[in-house]
Amino acid sequence: MSGTHPSRRRFLKKGAVAAGLVAAPPAALELTGGSSTVAAQVPAVADNNAIESVLYGRRSRFVTTTREIEGRSHYQVPRIRPNPQRPSAKTPLAELTGTITPTSLHFTTQHYYGIPDINPAEHTLMVEGMVDRPLVFTMDELHRLPFVSRVHFLECVGNRPSPRGATVTATHGRMGCSEWTGVPLSVLLAEAGVRGGASWIIAEAADGGRHTKSVPLAKALDDVLVAYGQNGEPVRPDHGYPLRLLVPGFEGIYNVKWLKRIKVVDQPYLSFQEHSRFLTPDPKTQRDSYDFGPNSVITRPSGDQRLEAHGAHVISGLAWSGSGKVSRVEVSTDGGATYQEAELVGPVLSKAHTRFCLPWRWNGDEAVLQSRCLDERGQLQPTEAEYAQYWGLTRGQLYGTIQSQLGHCNWIQPWKVGSDGKVTNGLEPVDVVVDVHA
Ligand SMILES: Nc1nc2c(c(=O)[nH]1)N[C@H]1C(S)=C(S)[C@@H](COP(=O)(O)O)O[C@H]1N2
Ligand SMILES: [Mo]
């Protein structure tokens, strides 16, 4: 789906918002006569009363938002759309409200292998290596241990603001935020007894690619979860059923899905995912990169949407930081010349998406909307120019390099509102953009 909001568009036309009075818009009714792109996808008949709809719930037939399928996962792999071997997809951020990403719409990344079909009755988790007592847990045993539930964002290092990104899904859709439930890894490690001299763990998956990642032991003992629940349900197959590692604030790739084995060791292993994708001959980028810095993006209005009326609007988006809580979000409507503090909506949780909003009157002039995040560590989200200067990169390098070899691309994404209300990307165009999800 495109990022347009047909229901909102119709509603705004009537001028109710411009008057500052927000009554509940009759979205479904409006849509029947609304945008043809959406109307075309609306099933002719409602099945709200069908048994299947009641058994597992079903959204309104007027709501048709889906994830957006990824083309390729590696710059050397030809673009195939969609690729059944590694079905990956992005979150339609512009269509969502609040901070929890519905699991059905939560982005998903598969590398060279597809999604396995694992029988939980046969699945086990082994904890071994530099421990006093190597242990094997069945899923039943894991479910009998004390658990925690925590809300955390999960983001792929492949997210990057980009002049070529027509929508916020294109630039930032490789992220989601869920309530994760599971056993703290520290509990399992205490059970096994970590030996002196240990400093890392290696987490390994049960999928065909045996996705493997090294995690510092200090992080493993801090807030890492062995998660079996996502948003109140068992983790779904594309997110790692029946068990995944959840490494809050770290790059997505650390969050090993279909988790099979934890090995306690005294050094990081150069596993396939590390050496083939994340190390380059350039010493500047040959660094360990873990938790994401402060970040934010406006999701409404954002690329490919259109403001249909002058007057009252609300600028809304998401802010997050891998270092902890968001402490402040500021929004600019003049391309960064001046900023105003936005309201943080709902709970502000550590290493979680935080929704922000700012009421704004649009008088019909061109405007450049952008947000910046300050996190509790005092780190401020950089502009593109500040980021490039810090790493000594040209704009060509910024957009012509694979995201995972750059690091964490958390610079500010501006959206430009034209005098016709059309919202487009506010970054200066560049010749080359390499877009890869890692
Ligand atoms: N076993 C396994 N774990 C994996 C991956 C994978 O391909 N296989 N992809 C990683 C990457 S790169 C990301 S960004 C996240 C995505 O998690 P999600 O699919 O639940 O959104 O999972 C990580 N864990
Ligand atoms: Mo990723």
Image (cartoon, rainbow, N blue to C red):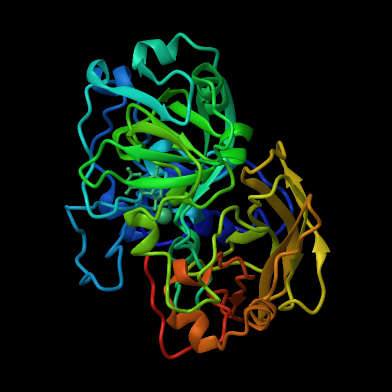
Place of residue 323 in the rendered image (x, y in percent of width and height, measured from the top left): 68, 49
Name the residue rendered at 55%, 34% in the picture.
Answer: 224
In the figure, residue 11 lies in which quadrant? Answer: bottom right
Label total for image? 0
Residue at 21% x, 59% y is 82
Q: Is residue 438 visible?
A: no
Q: Residue furthest top?
A: 144
Q: Position of residue 243 (x, y in %)?
A: 37, 28
Foreground residue among 99 and 349: 349
**Quadrant the C terminus occupies:** bottom left
Quadrant holding the N terminus: bottom left
Q: Nearer the viewer, residue 134 or 218?
A: 134
Residue at 59% in and 63% down: 301
The answer to which quarter of the image holds residue 389 is: bottom right
* Location of residue 54 in the rendering, given as x and y in whole percent from the top left corner: 32, 18
Question: Is 215 situated left or right of 325 in this image?
Answer: left
Q: Is residue 173 left or right of residue 238?
A: right
In the rendered view, tell whether residue 422 sits above or below residue 360: below
On the image, the x and y values in percent for residue 421 come to: 57, 74
Q: Is residue 164 above or below residue 201?
A: below
- Given residues 19 and 167, the one toward you in this image is 167
Identify the residue at image location x=52%, y=24%. 189
Residue extending farthest to the left is: 84
Q: Left or right? Give the position of 408 relative to 201.
A: right
For ligand 2, give the image quadrant: bottom left
Q: Is residue 276 above or below residue 111?
A: below
Q: Is residue 272 visible?
A: yes
Farthest-out residue, front: 197
